[in-house]
Image (cartoon, grey):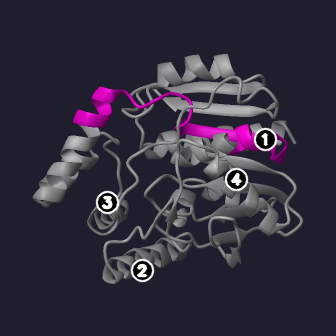
Amino acid sequence: MKTGIYKSSEGEARILKLYDFFQKSLGVIFNDRMVNTRFGVTHVLLAGPEQGLPVVITHGGNSITPQGLRGLLPLLKQGRYRVYAPDTIGHPGKSAQVRLSPRDQSYGQWLSDVLDGLGLESATFIGGSFGAGIILRLAAYAPQRITKMALFVPSGIVAVPLTSMVFRVGLPYSLYLLLPSRQRLYKAVQWMGSDIEDDVLQLIEAVFQHVRVEAEMPRPVTKAELADFTAPTLVIAAEKDAMFPGEAVIKRANEIFSNLTVVECLKGGTHYSSKSDLEYVTKRIAEFLEATE
């Protein structure tokens, strides 16, 4: 474990200011809770009726909870779900600055501890990208704690292609850090997609400048690790996702999950979903949750 993800106190303040901006922009009333885990304190945003179906939403890596919740607003506003959205420990946000290993069971243990701190025996889980890989670590570590699971553009199913990691992601990012400019920032995020909003781009720029980013994704889960995991599962991948190519994700998802209820690949989709793709994903997740309640 490593501690201290921010490069400076000023950088941390900048990230937290953006956190509050994104949270306010959602137009949702949240409560805040701090829960203890074996790795450190974790900040959780709570929304929705207390008696609603418990849904835990995990955000993408090197990002913040409110930005991750933006695309899932229809679920937050339905009034039927009690949403718990933890700031991933060791990533930007208000949780402890303790970075866990994505290679072992640490993230599964952390998420299990979060459930304990919230008084939940089990819950429905929704996560995209790095957040999906975290949920899969829980599926391997404590499968009984997941009642349903919805994953989109997920890490944790296939490894990132080496050529993408080096040339499409790593090299442009390194060039931006070496000689920061707006043009190099655009090139550094080009692999994500072409529909990144201006305020999200500001957040990405702040993370690049002020955070020691997590460069490693959660390792792919094995079929053996999921031997006891039988919860209904949704997987939506994106055809042109540079990190997790849709065809490869779909193929392996069919191999490792025993109760794959929904599996789809967004034609032409990229890692950062377009507005129309995100609306479709949210609609499919809502249908999946309703169908399996």
Is residue 151 rendered magenta in the image?
A: yes
**Separation (CA) of disc 3 from disc 1:** 32 Å
The alpha-carbon separation of the residues under discs 1 and 2 comes to 33 Å
Q: Position of residue 87 (x, y in %)?
A: 58, 65
Q: Which residue is mark 3?
A: 201
- Give the residue number, with chain letter if any, for mark 4: 109
Q: Residues within 10 Å of mark 2 (few under 14, many from 20)?
A: few
Q: Where residue 226 sits in the image (x, y, percent)?
A: 73, 29
Are the residues flagged by discs 4 and 1 in contact, CB closer than 8 Å?
Answer: no
Marks 2/4: CA–CA distance: 29 Å
Locate the C terminus and report the quarter of the image it occupies. Answer: top right
Residue 157, horizontal then vertical, whole percent:
56, 30
Q: Amino acid at mark 2?
A: Lys
What residue is pinned by disc 1? 148
Q: Which residue is mark 2?
A: 17
Q: Which quadrant of the structure image shows residue 114?
A: bottom right
